[in-house]
Image: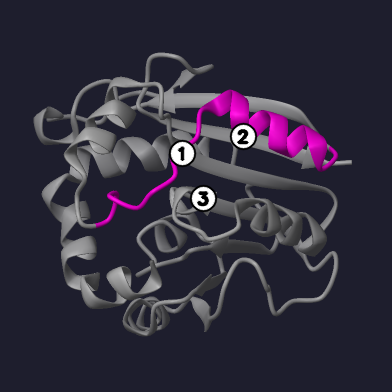
Amino acid sequence: MENIFNCYYKKYDAWYDENKFTYWSELEAIRKVLPKKGKGLEIGVGTGRFALPLGIQFGIDPSKNMIKIARKKGIDAQLGFGERLPFRNAFFDYVAIIITLCFVKDHKKVLEEARRVLKKKGKLIVGIINKNSFLGRFYQKKKSIFYKQANFFSPKEVINLLEGLGFNSFSYYQTVFKLPNVINSVQKPNKGFGKGGFVVISGEKR
């Protein structure tokens, strides 16, 4: 999967400019649960499209081409995989995994590693395309370059995984209520999940 993003990194990055209102709507949903301060890591940082505006200082990604762009934006981005994070235990105040979970080889290992590097009461923020939503069904049917090998999740599946790893104090926000190409303004995030295509789940490490 990392080869796809490495080869088509320009196409990936251009999507955010072509669908700017969807992108900005996703950022607003993430901001609802993102800590205002502290040391943060984004697993699957890509070109830094989320890390930069959200103020996430550290990132990791398997794509060399994407890492180069993220570093130019001032992000401390390292080449690597979420399954093997090059950080010591309890190093971060929060960890963000935005869209990335559906692309990794071993999602359970990635979540375990995220927990390992989190401080006690640290926050894990997971942003997903809800597989049961209109958007999840659209992407699964469309089979784009990026999503044809994706393993989509529902919010309940993610919550169950996080509960099994000892996370609690959950909060949820949803946005993207239309297909990205028809959204022409920033969509306000709503609490919960079930209607929006993009869902942000936040849990606290016990």
Q: Disc 3 versus disc 2: distance between alpha carbons?
A: 10 Å
Picture residue at 34% right of the left edge, 53% below the top: 149
Q: Disc 2 versus disc 1: distance between alpha carbons?
A: 9 Å
| In the image, residue 29 above or below residue 82 | above
What's the residue type where badge 3 is placed?
Answer: Leu
Picture residue at 34% right of the left edge, 76% below the top: 66
- Residue occupied by mark 1: 128
Q: Which residues are magenta?
A: 146-166
- Residue occupied by mark 2: 158
Q: Are marks 3 and 2 in contact (CB under 8 Å)?
A: yes
- Residue occupied by mark 3: 101
Q: Disc 3 versus disc 1: distance between alpha carbons?
A: 7 Å
Quadrant where the C terminus sits is top right
Question: What secondary structure is found at the residue carrying circle 1?
Answer: strand
Question: What secondary structure is found at the residue carrying circle 3?
Answer: helix
> Residue 16 colored magenta?
no
